């Protein structure tokens, strides 16, 4: 059983296990926010060549790698129902991968820092937080629930299940160097209601554990993420680790 933010509940039977995940994937692909990724920088400047990746082509490649990882897992654990039942379907992981960068601004992480600088007194800005805001509130398929995706897709996109105020440095001022405004990995405080809805099925102790933080390199960071999210992040790392190097070689930035 999967539930959407609008309150719609779909109960699957064995013949149609992927229908809602497929619908999520379609809504993401046809959304205006997804199309806007074609003009956003991955590493190299947009317009320099038709060869180099943008956020759009990067997201498509992440989706393919993510489904390939799931295929390998399904083959490896085909005889182990305790594990295989938790592996996301190809439609499900592709929906999550296609949406993972949908909230990132132009000019890569530099644009993210600049926006956080200008918004630091008003809740800050973080690309992953903006992703959740777009798919849950700003998307065009619902007046109040954005793209109105299923709970599992929203959970999979939720890389950092902590609020900005829980992990941010509150002592920053406009006089600090711009580099100090690298945003903490989080979601915006305004999406507290979305976070509560995503985690609603969890028992209180599990919910508290999932939202717990840890100190790393002097910064407060989220400690856990969902299984689907881990697959998406692995696919993301493989993609940009290989393709950013390929693009740099093609531009002769690296010999």
Image (cartoon, grey):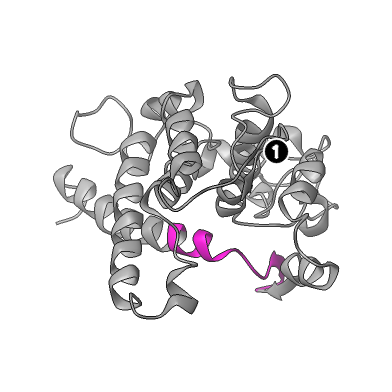
Please check the rendered image and state whether residue 220 is part of the magenta-colored stretch, yes or no: yes
Q: Name the residue rendered at 49%, 50% in the picture.
A: 13
Q: Name the residue rendered at 52%, 59% in the picture.
A: 229
Residue holding disc 1: 117
Task: Indicate the position of residue 121 as horizontal and vertical percent values.
Answer: 83, 37
What residue range appears in magenta? Answer: 217-232
Please check the rendered image and state whether residue 91 is part of the magenta-colored stretch, yes or no: no
Quadrant assignment for the C terminus: bottom left
- Residue in front for this viewpoint, 44 or 54: 54
Q: Is residue 101 visible?
A: no
Residue 54 falls left or right of residue 171: left
Task: Indicate the position of residue 26 as horizontal and vertical percent values.
Answer: 43, 31
- Residue in front for this viewpoint, 142 or 181: 142
Q: Name the residue rendered at 39%, 35% in the picture.
A: 41
- Mark 1 packing: few (<14 Cα in 10 Å), some, or many (20+)? many
Q: What is the total number of numbered labels drawn onto the structure image?
A: 1
- Residue in front for this viewpoint, 89 or 60: 89
**SS at circle 1:** helix
Q: Is residue 112 visible?
A: yes
- Residue in front for this viewpoint, 223 or 105: 223
Q: Name the residue rendered at 62%, 32% in the picture.
A: 148
């Amino acid at each position: 059983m999967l539930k959407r933010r609008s309150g719609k509940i779909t109960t699957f039977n064995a013949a149609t296990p992927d229908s809602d995940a497929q619908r999520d994937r379609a809504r993401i692909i046809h959304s205006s926010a997804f199309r806007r990724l074609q003009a956003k920088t991955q590493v190299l400047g947009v317009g320099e060549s038709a060869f180099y990746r943008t956020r759009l082509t990067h997201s498509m490649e992440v989706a393919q790698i993510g489904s390939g990882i799931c295929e390998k897992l399904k083959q490896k654990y085909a005889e182990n129902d305790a594990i295989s039942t938790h592996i996301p379907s190809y439609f499900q992981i592709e929906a999550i991968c296609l949406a993972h960068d949908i909230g990132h601004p132009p000019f890569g992480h530099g644009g993210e820092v600049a926006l956080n600088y200008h918004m630091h007194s008003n809740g800050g800005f973080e690309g992953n937080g903006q992703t959740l805001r777009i798919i849950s509130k700003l998307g065009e398929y619902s007046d109040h629930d954005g793209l109105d995706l299923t709970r599992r897709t929203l959970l999979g996109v939720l890389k950092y299940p902590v609020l900005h105020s829980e992990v941010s440095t509150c002592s920053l001022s406009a006089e600090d160097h711009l580099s100090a405004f690298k945003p903490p990995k989080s979601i915006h405080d305004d999406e507290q209601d979305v976070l509560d809805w995503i985690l609603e099925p969890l028992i209180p102790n599990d919910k508290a554990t999932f939202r717990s933080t840890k100190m790393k390199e002097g910064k407060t960071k989220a400690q856990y993420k969902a299984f689907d999210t881990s697959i998406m992040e692995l696919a993301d790392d493989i993609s940009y680790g290989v393709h950013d190097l390929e693009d740099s070689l093609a531009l002769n930035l690296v010999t």
